[in-house]
């Protein structure tokens, strides 16, 4: 039996988490042994994928953590259907590198390719096409789940549909995905046609999402939260469309995974791993507003040369261009606050949140606006509306940190009062009292009943699940 190792296990934002005993099983048998050991001790354990959740979704301070990154084999890929069967530690990068060779791309990808299939299913992640193709769970055909009792159960839309729709998005509470059957989509070029569109303010951004969503394959806006008055909520919208068959014959050579991957050097010389200290200086010297202003101005130039061609990898994984970029918020780290707000309330609520951040000196250094549609999963975070991701640096000063948490909770109340929701991959601040407000009392009662059925001893826990009182 492998030994549990003492490690520091934090969220991606480095602002929450702490010491835990970690084990990295490589096979289903080793995973079953680990579950048996935890059951025997009567303790609890957190499941962890690539650790890309910003907050405490896969941390377990003082407890145990099962890191599934070594169960990372693609068991099969069918070039006729584009369906992959994966172990949970297979990453988005592993999957697209396998599928693109046969002219397929994952239907739903996150902003970083480091995310694992297990983590993607457990959080039911979304991409820049959520309004069109839905969430990650919608491209999962079936999965096998190891329950707390160590039993493997198979789930699909026909087989145990209730568990299927609750484990996807169930943040690792109902069992461990050990094998997932995932659909990808056909692409006819290794590149897409991309437009940069300057959006003068928040309403302009929302209007572009509404105007283009029926034609565009992907839409996402970068927001400059330093814009005030008539410029409040300004940004650069990016639209990307896939190519039709035969439209981009030269694009076929980009089915070579090496031509899709984001480059590791800037101008072919400077290792990108060296860029974060420059970004750190911008944060530490409070010059983010200047960087954002320059980026916004550069948007006009991009708009003029649009459309242009970009590989799928370059379009989707912008954040992977700068390895360890999150270190720019050291030593305090960062949190991300991502409210999901129904369409009718979006302009009012999102505007108010930006104003509150500016009034209180917690201006996010990065913002992302997306359009969403509802999905059929029990613990869904999706709404027929929009999400606005806000990355905020955390101070090492305890009082200022507490103020930030209070500020986020006040913003959360406004969102919840407007019928909005939250996404636990990005949360670090919600309290137990918000859990039922996010999902509705009935959904929470059903989820708790399933937890009682499949994990009666409460073996699967995380810092997040305890914070929410699951
Ligand atoms: C730079 C960056 C960009 C991102 N962009 C997006 C985006 O565009 N869209 C989006 O939706 N999200 C995005 N995310 C968030 C990310 O997709 C989610 O946090 C995702 O869940 C991370 O997967 P992971 O493998 O790192 O899992 P972890 O963060 O380690 O765990 C996430 C959850 O999954 C559970 N879990 C992990 N493995 C299993 C398993 N095998 N069985 C059952 N439960 C399991 C854990 O207990 C935990 O609750 C981004 C994150 C980063 C850092």
Image (cartoon, rainbow, N blue to C red):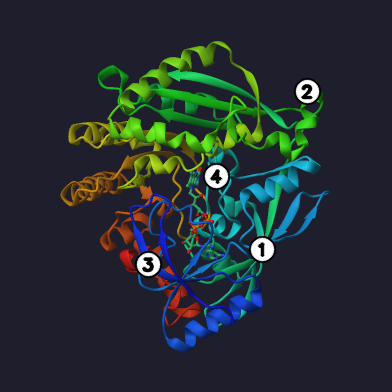
Q: Which residue is mark 3?
A: 19
Q: Quick check: is the Cβ at mark 1 less than 8 Å away from ligand 1? A: no
Dot 3 or dot 4, earlier in sequence: 3
Residue 259 sits above or below residue 54 on the image: above
Residue at numbered disc 4: 110
Q: CA distance from mark 3 to mark 1?
A: 27 Å
Residue at 51% x, 12% y: name it. Answer: 301
Q: Residue furthest left?
A: 399
| Inter-mark Cα distance, 2 to 1 | 35 Å
Return the disc, 4 or 1, that comes first in the chain's sequence.
1
Residue tagged 1: 87
The residue labelled by disc 2 is 247
Residue 215 visible (yes or no): no
Residue depth check, mark 3 versus mark 4: number of the one nearer the observer: 3
Crowding at mark 1 (Cα within 10 Å: few <14, some 14-19, many 20+): many
The residue most toward the front is: 269
**Marks 3 and 4, Cα distance to the nearest angstrom?**
27 Å
In this rendering, would 368 be left or right of 89? left
Alpha carbon separation for disc pair 2 and 3: 53 Å
> Which tag, 2 or 4, sits closer to the chain's start?
4
Q: Name the quarter where the N terminus is drawn.
A: bottom right
Q: Residues within 10 Å of mark 2 (few under 14, many from 20)?
A: few
The x and y percentages for residue 265 are: 59, 32
**Disc 2 to disc 4, C-alpha distance:** 26 Å
Q: Is mark 4 within 8 Å of ligand 1?
A: yes
Label 4: state its secondary structure: loop
For the image shown, how many numbered marks are present on the structure? 4
Kindly check if marks 3 and 4 are in contact, taking CB atoms under 8 A apart as contact: no
């Amino acid at each position: 039996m492998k030994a549990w190792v003492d490690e520091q296990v934090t969220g991606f934002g480095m602002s929450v988490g702490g010491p835990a005993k970690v084990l990295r099983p490589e096979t289903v048998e080793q995973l079953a042994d680990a579950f048996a050991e935890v059951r025997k001790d009567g303790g609890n354990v957190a499941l962890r994928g690539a650790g890309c959740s910003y907050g405490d979704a896969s941390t377990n301070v003082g407890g145990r953590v099962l890191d599934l990154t070594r169960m990372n084999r693609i068991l099969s890929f069918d070039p006729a259907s584009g369906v992959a069967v994966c172990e949970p530690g297979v990453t988005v990068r592993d999957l697209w590198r396998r599928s693109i060779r046969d002219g397929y791309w994952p239907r739903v990808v996150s902003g970083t390719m480091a995310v694992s299939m297990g983590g993607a299913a457990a959080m039911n992640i979304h991409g820049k096409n959520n309004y069109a193709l839905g969430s990650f769970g919608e491209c999962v055909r079936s999965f096998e789940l190891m329950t707390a009792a160590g039993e493997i159960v198979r789930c699909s839309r026909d087989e145990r549909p209730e568990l299927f729709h609750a484990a996807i998005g169930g943040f690792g509470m109902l069992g461990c995905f050990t094998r997932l059957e995932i659909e990808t989509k056909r692409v006819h070029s290794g590149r897409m046609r991309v437009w940069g569109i300057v959006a003068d303010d928040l309403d302009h951004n929302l209007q572009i999402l509404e105007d283009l969503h029926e034609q565009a394959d992907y839409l996402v806006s970068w927001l400059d939260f330093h814009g005030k008055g008539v410029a409040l909520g300004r940004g650069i919208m990016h639209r990307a469309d896939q190519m039709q068959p035969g439209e981009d014959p030269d694009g076929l050579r980009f089915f070579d995974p090496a031509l899709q991957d984001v480059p590791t050097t800037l101008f072919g010389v400077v290792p990108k791993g060296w860029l974060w200290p420059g970004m750190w200086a911008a944060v530490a010297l409070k010059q983010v507003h200047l960087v954002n202003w320059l980026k916004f101005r550069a948007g006009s130039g991009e708009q003029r040369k649009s459309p242009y061609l970009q590989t799928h990898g370059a379009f989707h994984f912008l954040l992977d261009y700068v390895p360890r970029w999150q270190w720019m918020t050291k030593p305090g780290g960062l949190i991300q606050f991502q409210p999901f707000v129904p369409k009718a309330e979006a302009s009012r609520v999102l505007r108010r949140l930006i104003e509150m951040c500016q009034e209180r000196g917690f201006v996010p250094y990065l913002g992302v606006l997306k359009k969403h549609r509802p999905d059929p999963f029990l613990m869904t975070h999706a709404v027929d509306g929009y999400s606005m991701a806000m990355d905020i640096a955390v101070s090492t000063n305890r009082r200022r940190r507490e103020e930030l948490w209070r500020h986020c909770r006040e913003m959360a109340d406004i969102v919840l009062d407007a019928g909005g929701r939250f996404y636990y991959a990005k949360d670090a601040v919600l309290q137990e009292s918000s859990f039922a407000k996010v999902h509705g009392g009935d959904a929470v009662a059903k989820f708790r009943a399933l937890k009682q059925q499949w994990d009666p001893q409460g073996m699967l826990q995380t810092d997040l699940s305890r914070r929410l009182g699951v």
